[in-house]
Amino acid sequence: MKGSYLLLIKLNDDRYIKYGIRKNCFFKKGFYIYVGSALNNLEKRME
């Protein structure tokens, strides 16, 4: 199955997070939404 998905993330505290090819990035506490696409195996990503 193919499709798109949204991941709601809540940070309770300010923090540095390493992601992708970037080094540590600073995120303030609050809510964030990650938007992703799955060209294959959407079901696996949803698990």
Image: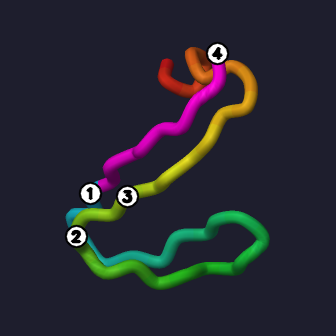
The main secondary structure of the magenta stretch is strand
Q: Does the CB distance between marks 1 and 2 fall below 8 Å?
A: yes
Mark 2 is surrounded, within 10 Å at the Cα level, by few (under 14), some (14 to 19) or many (20 or more) other residues, namely few
In primary-sequence order, the first of circles 4 and 2 is 4
Amino acid marked by disc 4:
Met
In primary-sequence order, the first of circles 4 and 1 is 4
Q: Does the CB distance between marks 3 and 1 fall below 8 Å?
A: no
Q: Which residues are magenta?
A: 1-9
Say which residue label 1 marks: 10
Amino acid marked by disc 3:
Ile
Using the image as rendered, state which of residue 14 and residue 34 is in the foreground: 34
Please identify, in this view, whether the residue under mark 4 or under mark 1 is nearer the observer: 4
Amino acid marked by disc 2:
Gly
Say which residue label 2 marks: 30
Say which residue label 4 marks: 1
Left or right of 32 on screen, residue 46: right
For the residue labelled by badge 2, is the local secondary structure a helix, a strand or a loop?
strand
In primary-sequence order, the first of circles 1 and 2 is 1
| Quarter of the rendering containing residue 15 | bottom left
Say which residue label 3 marks: 33
Residue 12 position, x and y percent, is: 21, 64
Q: Is residue 2 magenta?
A: yes
